[in-house]
Image (cartoon, rainbow, N blue to C red):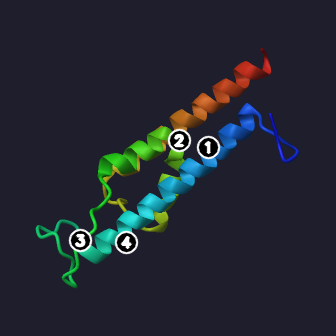
């Protein structure tokens, strides 16, 4: 399939997906850090410090799952750039493990397709 003289291949689709999912993961960590600073970690009331309705935080599960679905690099970058969730072992151990598992899967896929 051609689009503006660019052939759309499976590799191009994979690269576009990887770029997009990692950008989304990075932004999610930044947004959650911003909300944590603005609203505090665990506020009982649903109003922020200015009396405005509090925006909900992004769940830890969502932050982990975005890494599982291919955003592990963006999640790790966001975690350390925004200094968010760096004290939680669940994040500092799981995200690098997810990244290395994904890297191993990509290397294996390239290996299989190179000799097929």
Q: Which residue is mark 1?
A: 17
Dot label at residue 70: 2
Dot label at residue 77: none
Contact (Cβ within 8 Å) of mark 1 with mark 4: no
Tell me the CA gap for discs 1 and 4. 26 Å
Q: Earlier in the sequence, mark 2 or mark 4?
A: 4
Closer to the observer: label 2 or label 1?
1
Q: Position of residue 11 (x, y in %)?
A: 73, 35
16 is higher (above) or lower (below) than 88? above
Which residue lies at the image location 52% right of the left edge and 33% below the top edge? 101
Per the image, label 4 sits on a secondary structure element best described as helix
Contact (Cβ within 8 Å) of mark 2 with mark 1: yes
Per the image, label 2 sits on a secondary structure element best described as helix
Q: Which residue is mark 4?
A: 34
Q: Earlier in the sequence, mark 2 or mark 1?
A: 1
Q: Is 99 or 67 nearer to us in this picture?
A: 67
Within 10 angstroms of label 3, few (less than 14), some, or many (20 or more) residues?
Answer: some
Which residue lies at the image location 35% right of the left edge and 59% below the top edge? 85
């Amino acid at each position: 399939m051609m689009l503006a003289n660019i052939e759309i291949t499976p590799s191009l689709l994979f690269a576009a997906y990887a770029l997009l999912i990692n950008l989304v993961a990075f932004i999610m960590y930044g947004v959650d850090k911003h909300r944590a600073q603005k609203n505090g970690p665990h506020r009982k009331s649903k109003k922020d410090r200015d009396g405005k309705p509090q925006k909900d935080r992004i769940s830890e599960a969502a932050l982990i799952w975005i890494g599982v679905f291919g955003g592990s690099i963006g999640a790790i970058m966001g975690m350390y750039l925004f200094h968010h969730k760096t004290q939680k072992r669940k994040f500092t151990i799981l995200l690098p493990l997810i990244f290395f598992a994904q890297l191993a899967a990509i290397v294996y896929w390239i290996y299989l397709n190179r000799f097929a």
